[in-house]
Image (cartoon, rainbow, N blue to C red):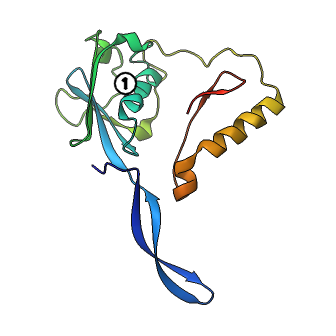
Amino acid sequence: MPSEPVAAVDVLRFRDGRWLAEKDAVVTEAEITVVLNGHELVKLTATPRHLSELAAGYLYCSGVIDHIDQVESLEVDEMQGKVYVVVARSDILNECPGSYRSDYPGDCLTDSSSGCSTDCPGTTAPWDIDPLDPNDLLKLMNEFEKSCHLFHETGGSHAAAISDGKEITLL
């Protein structure tokens, strides 16, 4: 698994009527497998950074956990591209039979294209928040855009942020 989020690649650019050999920066990606209580749960394609946050966020989004305190352990194996998570409820996968398909006996493997499930226990409706002032929203959007350094370097990455309505609290 690549350890750096950016790699240099050789490219040909057509500029001023001729081809130029140059180096360009691209985002690296790796396949990350989230292993939940010993079972492969999901394979995600991601930039190889913040993998523990990626796994915890996926588990929260899919309704497997509703609070980080439910995670008993979380271990990232960067060499194997796996995140091992143990949660207190050993029966959680049994409650979501339609959400996971299995290609291997005993495994509940899905892929990231299936998105977040709304069928699992603990999944709730979107947050109940007060509307944002349009000027505050534009300020937050500008702050967010300026903070997306990897996108500015490569032109090809996704980013997300959490805000309290006045400032970005997590990027």
Quadrant location of the C terminus?
A: top right
* Residue nearest the observer in this picture, 4 or 18: 4
Please report the residue visible at 58 percent of the width from the left and 32 percent of the height from the top. 161
* Residue nearest the observer in this picture, 106 or 154: 154
Identify the image quadrant of residue 48. Answer: top left
Q: Position of residue 162 (x, y in %)?
A: 59, 27
Look at the picture and state if 168 lies above or below 103. above
Residue carrying label 1:
98
Q: Judge from the rendering whether residue 67 lies leftward or rightward of residue 38; answer left or right.
A: right
Look at the picture and state if 120 lies above or below 14. above
Count of marks overlaid on the render: 1
Q: Position of residue 121 (x, y in %)?
A: 43, 12
Identify the image quadrant of residue 66. Answer: top left
The residue under label 1 is which amino acid type?
A: Gly
Q: Position of residue 136 (x, y in %)?
A: 78, 30
Looking at the rendered structure, the secondary structure element under dot 1 is loop
Please report the residue visible at 82 percent of the width from the left and 31 percent of the height from the top. 134
- Dot 1, how many residues are within 10 Å of its Cα: few (below 14), some (14-19), or many (20+)? few
Please report the residue visible at 50 percent of the width from the left and 84 percent of the height from the top. 20
* Residue nearest the observer in this picture, 120 or 133: 133
Look at the picture and state if 22 lies above or below 46. below
Q: Position of residue 19 (x, y in %)?
A: 52, 86
Q: Residue furthest bottom?
A: 17
Look at the picture and state if 50 lies above or below 153. above
Please report the residue visible at 54 percent of the width from the left and 15 percent of the height from the top. 124
